[in-house]
Image (cartoon, helix red, strand yellow):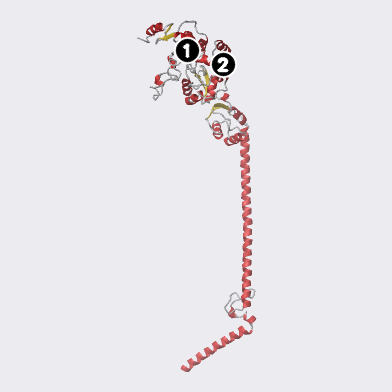
Amino acid sequence: MRDDDNQRRTRGQEDQRQNRARQFRVEFNDEDDMDDSVSQGPRSAAGEPDVLHSYSSPQTRKAMVESERRAQKAQEKALRERSREKGRKNRRFFRMIWMSMILILGIGTGQYLVSGMADMLAYQKPESVVTVEIPKGASVGEIAKVLYRGGVIDQPGFFQLYSTITRANASYLHGTYELKTDMDYEAIINYLQTNNNRTDIVKVLFPEGLNVQEVAALMEKNGVCSAQDILKYANSQDFNNYDLIKTIANDSERYYLLEGYLFPDTYEFYKDEDPKQALGKMINNAGKKLTADVRRKAQEQGMTLDQVLNLASIIQEESADEEDMYQVSSVLHNRLKNGVATGTQQLGCDSTIYYPYRTRAQVPAAQRETYSSRYNTYNITGLPPGPIANPGSAAIDAALNPAKTDYYYFCHSADGKAYYAKTAEQHQKNLKKAGLAQ
């Protein structure tokens, strides 16, 4: 048995040697035939081995590298073609989306323009009257919303665009207006650019004898404009273009330049009116009331209009009634003419002591104890620097036509009874009669 085993091992080893010899002869005797050998593995469709081995020939290696390069180029070309095709599809898709958007936008824009043009021309709009209030300082966009809410327009955006293009957005005024709903844009714009169409009008009566501070307070109370604005402009140079104001001497002693020139009367103002415009109405009215006859008489007496108004303002404040005005005027005229000779060169009128305030209580607390008015006719000689109030026609007439008297003194009782005197002694007796002295 041991012999049989040895024989089997010997035959197996011999078979292995023969196989190796056979492989060696195939590989080195015919390199081309060897490319078809089973030991190189399966071949490709081109007849080239699919796998390189350590024992592959250089020609085989070169062929396989070239094959791989061609395959990679083909793959890259196919990839590029797929990308180009995908790009073409994407462009077609986005072109379709873009055209759809343009079409939709065109339809929307067309509808907007058609409706806007119809609104602009008030095409087939029903007629009715509505009241709208344009806020002070409102932008054109805010005005468009007000008109839309009031039913005057249907397209606020289109109205805003139209106002901007026509440059009407800087000319709108504030206030309350009554508008017809069938008005086109041009008519609406023209209507809102003039105060004459406003309905928020307030009538204010200014009695004779109010001073500038009281005029300002009354304007604010009636919603015309703020008292602070009136006081600011009443002492400015903004009215020098008015002929009546040009004649006023530029006296720094005046508290308010326009004092005396705001003629007492009933005026119509707009709510929230420009203070310069409101004051201008009163100055224009004063110019009309100071007629040619008034100016002629002032010239005959050697007085300027400012002096007439100055004297008339004191007469207005000191008199009990219109009849008394001519007597008070005579006293003041006598003092102005003969004051030095009679010792009455100071007019001595109580109404001037605290001007521009009425009473000591109105003087600001911080100044009250030491306050001294530049208009105080107990301290100065002659007329004060300017009027102390705004006199009416009767006081102006009295200033120009004083009664013919020899009076140099006057006083009034609490009930308004007037007392006149030629001398200081008579005046002291009158003070007692009037209950003004012991």
Residue 334 visible in the displayed image: no
At 63% from the left and 62% from the top, the residue drawn is 80
- Give the answer, above or below, for where 273 lies relative to 40: above
The amino acid on which the numbered mark 2 sits, given as a three-letter code, is Lys
- Give the answer, above or below, for where 86 lies relative to 212: below
Mark 2 and mark 1 residues within 8 Å of each other at the beta carbon: no
Q: Mark 1 sits on what residue?
A: 315
Residue 231 visible in the displayed image: yes
Q: Mark 2 sits on what residue?
A: 288
* Image coords of residue 249 (percent x, y): 53, 20
Q: Residue furthest front?
A: 341
> Gap between marks 2 and 1, in whole Å?
21 Å
Residue 412 image-quadrant placement: top left
The residue nearer to you, when weighing 139 against 178, is: 139
At 49% from the left and 13% from the top, the residue drawn is 311
Looking at the rendered structure, the number of numbered marks drawn on it comes to 2
Secondary structure of residue under mark 1: helix
Report the disc number at residue 155.
none
* Image coords of residue 234 (percent x, y): 50, 23
* Image coords of residue 393 (percent x, y): 52, 13
